[in-house]
Image (spheres, grey):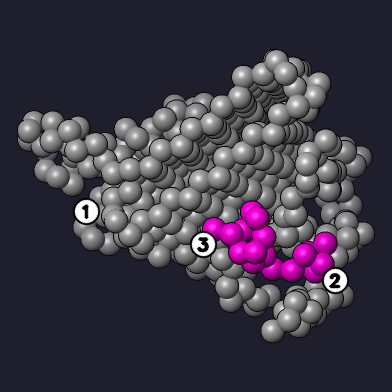
Amino acid sequence: MDAVNTMAPWREAFETFTANDEAAAMGAKSREAAFARFEAHGLPTRRQEYWKYTPIRDLTPETGVSTREAVDPFAGVDAYRLIFVDGRIDMPRSDHGALAAVAEIAGTDGAPWMNGVFGALQNREIPGAMFQVDRPFADLNMAMFTDGLAVRIPAGLALDKPIHLRYEGAVGSHLRLEMLVEKGASVTVLESGAGALTTGAEIVIGDGASLHHLRAQTEVGERQFTALYAQVGAEASFKSFTLSADAALIRNETIVTMAGDNGSGHVAAGVMGMDGTLIDNTVYVSHEAEHCESRQVIKSVLDGDAKSVFQGKIFVKKDAQKTDGYQMSQAVLLSEKAEFDAKPELEIYADDVICSHGCTTGALDEDAKFYLRSRGCMEREAEALLVAAFVDEAIMEIEDEGLQEKMRATTDEWMQARARGQ
């Protein structure tokens, strides 16, 4: 089937959506432009540089989502919980009113502060880069999102508890987050659930502000595509951690712009996969200011024929002197059939920087396993302890110790399931 015919069902679905869905009026021009980009690009193929490790098959506008049996790691966390079912917020089950009492939530007509956020980060080219990267699923999300959250955290406010975005349902929905964290404010954002085919986020972090982002993809059965854009101001901090397990296909794209001097941007992920798993973490950090630090830490544990992909880029503009950029991707293969593909990139135009990347792939340390077994551990128990220690370097990127423990518990549950042969 040629590219035109392949995209015809998507065009029909988009036109039906814009004609009939009440949500389509919000950002109508941006939606049309985004869909035009998606249509021109088409569904990605392995012939495209950033998709050669991640094939896309059998994806249509009717593609739904499925949930595998797993516990939501954030179920017991005290949070402002916003629950979306089949692409729409479930108001009776959500803390929308409580959150609106402490932060500004924009309605369907938007808000003045959104002018500098909505579409501004996603459509922005990386100045000075050798080439720009097409992100078709981010465009699909912007074109067809049905609901989400647009919220401003006022200057100086440290939000008293996290915002938890919970995705449920079986429809292949598209959900969106637009967020402005004003000067000196701080907030934690949690995401979980399989009930979204795509999610998109644009987050502006003001000078001296901080945002901690934590995403659990432990319930996704089939597919999920995410795109997160973050702009980090002067002396501001952005930290993101994603834990993914056992999905047929997950693609997480994180694009971070270090826009102000002395900012910090960390992106970390833990990947756990058994048979039939493909999880892709693609990260692009653009350093455009001086004295900024970035970290990319990806840890994968793979069994059966599971596959993990890491594509990470550090781009440093000419004026971004004193940049400190670091990438580390490591994988433990518990099976001879497991696969880890890493594609680290550095593109540097400044001459006073410290930038590095490293990548290792291998089995668990047999000497360490022997030591634990000599101390009375069964083989699977010894492997579980070693895996926990391996993944913990990424988990340590999480700021909150209580949330760290939630992720450690989920890692332990995965190893226990593996031991049971599930």
**Residue extent of the magenta highlight:** 37-53
According to the picture, the residue beneath numbered tag 3 turns out to be: 249
Q: Which mark is residue 419?
A: 1
N-term mark: 3 or 2: 2
Q: Residue at x 84, y 76 (%)?
A: 15
Alpha-carbon distance for marks 2 and 1? 48 Å
**Residue type, mark 3 in image:** Leu
Q: Quadrant of residue 27?
A: bottom right
Left or right of 152 on screen, residue 369? left
Alpha-carbon distance for marks 3 and 2? 28 Å
Q: Residue at x 44, y 47 (%)?
A: 271
Q: Which mark is residue 327?
A: none
Quarter of the C terminus within the rendering: bottom left
Left or right of 367 on screen, residue 265? right
Q: Does the CB distance between marks 3 and 2 fall below 8 Å?
A: no
User: Horizontal and vertical percent for residue 327?
Assistant: 54, 32
Number of disc labels: 3
According to the picture, the residue beneath numbered tag 2 turns out to be: 18
**Residue type, mark 1 in image:** Ala
Q: Residue at x 77, y 58 (%)?
A: 139
